[in-house]
Amino acid sequence: MYTENSSKEKIDKNFHETINILKKNNIKYWLCQGTLLGIIRDKDLIPWDHDIDIAIWQDNFIKEKIIKIMLSNNFNIKKKFMNENDQLTFVKKGGREVDFNFYEIISKFNKKIAFIDWKIPKNVFCKIIEAISVANIYDGKFKRLIKLFIIFQPFLLKLKLFLISKNLFYQSAGYSHPAEHVEELTEITFQDMTVTIPKKFKEYLKYIYGENWTIAQKKYNWIKDSPSTIMKED
């Protein structure tokens, strides 16, 4: 069994608990994105990455099952600034946020591609509307500025819903990679616990983060910097 051990950071409580929950409920998963990157590259969770990234294949019932078992273990669903309907985020005191990413298979150039569909505002104008429409719960970098405009929240929420109804507000974006990168999974030991990762983790990380995936980038932007990001109009 492949082993990644580190003494740099105590294991994250929510990470440890979530992995145990998935095992107990026989849910097939793999670690992905920044969590996998940190474990392989740094033999640790990335200090400035504040969430745990878990991937699961999409089906008709898996989201409801994840919600049920996470809530039963005293996690709460996080209300979000972005409308990411292929991702669920859970929070609990004492550890990082836990992101469940629900991947589907799409066809591109006659190849099977694993893709996650996140909904993001189409432009800067839509981003501003999005932020102010949830000003009461917005917790982003500009939260002090956004809360100054909270008086406009009801109007901009209605405007947002109107634009959504006309398909003028969101576009789809998300990581993509050849499905073969995650068709075979393997277990490794990380900080005295067994976790599941793609067997072709090096190919996966290179595809997601590029040739320089072994070099840490503190200001990484997944939309601009990842060669694997797909942007498409809805």
Image (cartoon, rainbow, N blue to C red):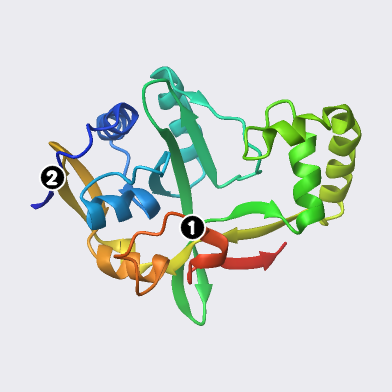
Answer above or below: position of 195 versus 103: above
How packed mark 1 is, by other alpha carbons closer than 10 Å (few <14, some 14-19, many 20 or more), is some
**Picture coordinates of residue 16, whole percent (x, y):** 26, 31
For label 1, the SS is: strand
User: Dividing the image into 4 quarters, which one contains the C terminus?
Assistant: bottom right
Q: Is residue 155 in sight in this rendering?
A: yes
Give the residue drawn at x 68%, y 27%.
Answer: 137
**Distance (Cα) linking label 1 and label 2:** 31 Å
Which disc is residue 5 wearing? 2
On the rendered structure, is 180 left or right of 2? right
Q: Is residue 58 in sight in this rendering?
A: no
| 175 vs 10, nearest the viewer | 10
Answer above or below: position of 122 versus 156: below
| 152 vs 216, nearest the viewer | 216
**Picture coordinates of residue 171, whole percent (x, y):** 70, 59
Which disc is residue 79 wearing? none
**Picture coordinates of residue 30, whole percent (x, y):** 31, 49
Q: Between tags 1 and 2, which lies in front?
A: 2
Quarter-of-image position of residue 40:
bottom left
Amino acid type, residue under disc 1 in the picture: Glu
The residue that mark 1 highlights is 104
Give the residue drawn at x 45%, y 77%.
Answer: 111
